[in-house]
Amino acid sequence: MKSKLYVPGVGQAGVNQLGGVFVNGRPLPDHVRRQIVELALVGIRPCDISRKLLVSHGCVSKILTRFYETGSIRPGSINGANGRHSKKGYSNRMDVNKCQDVNISPSSNKTHETEEASSVRNYQSSSSTSPEHLPTNFYSSSRYFSFHQQSQFFFQHQLPPSAAPTNPSSDENDASDDDDDNSSISSIESKPNTSSSSLIKHSIENILSMKVTIKSKRPLSSSSHSSTDERINNSNNKRQKSLAC
DNA sequence: CTCGTGACGGTTGAA
DNA sequence: CATTCAACCGTCACG
């Protein structure tokens, strides 16, 4: 039932049961992972998130489980704490990048969350199309670069322009957009900020507007908004509690 | 209907 | 340089 298509430079791209495009064996794009976490934080249920973002339920569950346990939205091999990257000197290079980008001393006793946030910033700042910003600790540059371009192509066709990835053509716009993303992600993983919360609200509103379009396009089980809102609030309280721990 | 989990096939980097 | 292996990925199906 799973249709597959081969995309040069990416590998086997497939379409899951929800109609979403994915690349087998490759992590979801960062903005998709971020949207999953943001939607979960505002109380959207995982099943709704999977339907909205066209990501499989299992993937949403895994990402949220990882996020609740570690506070990280990154794929497991990113921060070099585990996986194959820990064997080589990636962590040293990561520390250098952190010093340059985030002004965090590598020798300072940083918490896991600050390290994660800095790694997120480092990765997002490096996700611009400028070759010298290609990630050194992630995948190899050439493969990652081709994948990133292709994934942007895919999700530009999947998501509305408000939730679509940034335009790779202009660096300054990328930088500003990355700042928006960074502020939203830092507000999630650190303390809440008033200005960034508006950004979160903005992005979530965009996503929710997409939800309306999707629901109008493909009506799910006919459920009234009031009952769903109550369930959303309940689950939101539960997740806020778990997050506060 | 929702959610957690394991199997599966695929990708990636190191050895 | 090609091959092998381990770790990780997302999807799917099951309970």
Image (cartoon, coloured by chain):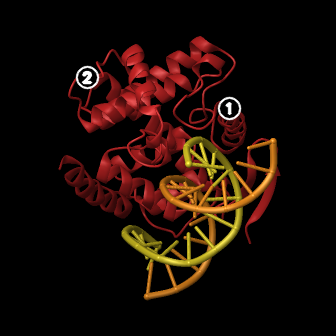
Chain colours: A red, B yellow, C orange
Q: Say whether residue A196 is left or right of residue B14.
A: left
Same chain assignment for discs 2 and 1? yes
Label 2, on which residue? A107
Give the quadrant of the N terminus of chain A: bottom right
Can residue A42 be seen here? The reply is no
Q: Which chain is indicated by disc 2?
A: A
- Is residue A240 or residue A122 the one in the foreground? A122
Q: Say whether residue A51 is left or right of residue A99.
A: right
- Residue A51 position, x and y percent, is 55, 59
- Is residue A69 or residue A96 the one in the foreground? A96
Label 1, on which residue? A145
- Residue A52 position, x and y percent, is 54, 53
- Is residue A82 or residue A237 the one in the foreground? A82
Under mark 1, the amino acid is: Phe
> Would you place residue A84 above or below residue A198 in this image?
below
Q: Which type of secondary structure does the marked residue at label 1 adopt?
A: helix
Give the Cα distance between marks 2 and 1: 31 Å
Can residue A39 be seen here? The reply is yes
Residue occupying image coordinates x 38% and y 33%: A185
Under mark 2, the amino acid is: Ser
Mark toward the start of the polypeptide (2 vs 1)? 2
Disc sitting over residue A237 in the figure: none
Q: Residues within 10 Å of mark 1 (few under 14, many from 20)?
A: many
> Would you place residue B2 above or below residue A114 in this image?
below
- Residue A60 position, x and y percent, is 47, 57
Q: Which type of secondary structure does the marked residue at label 2 adopt?
A: loop
Residue occupying image coordinates x 60% and y 27%: A166
Q: Nearer the viewer, mark 2 or mark 1?
A: 2
- Residue A128 position, x and y percent, is 60, 22
Residue occupying image coordinates x 46% and y 32%: A89
Residue occupying image coordinates x 53% and y 16%: A175
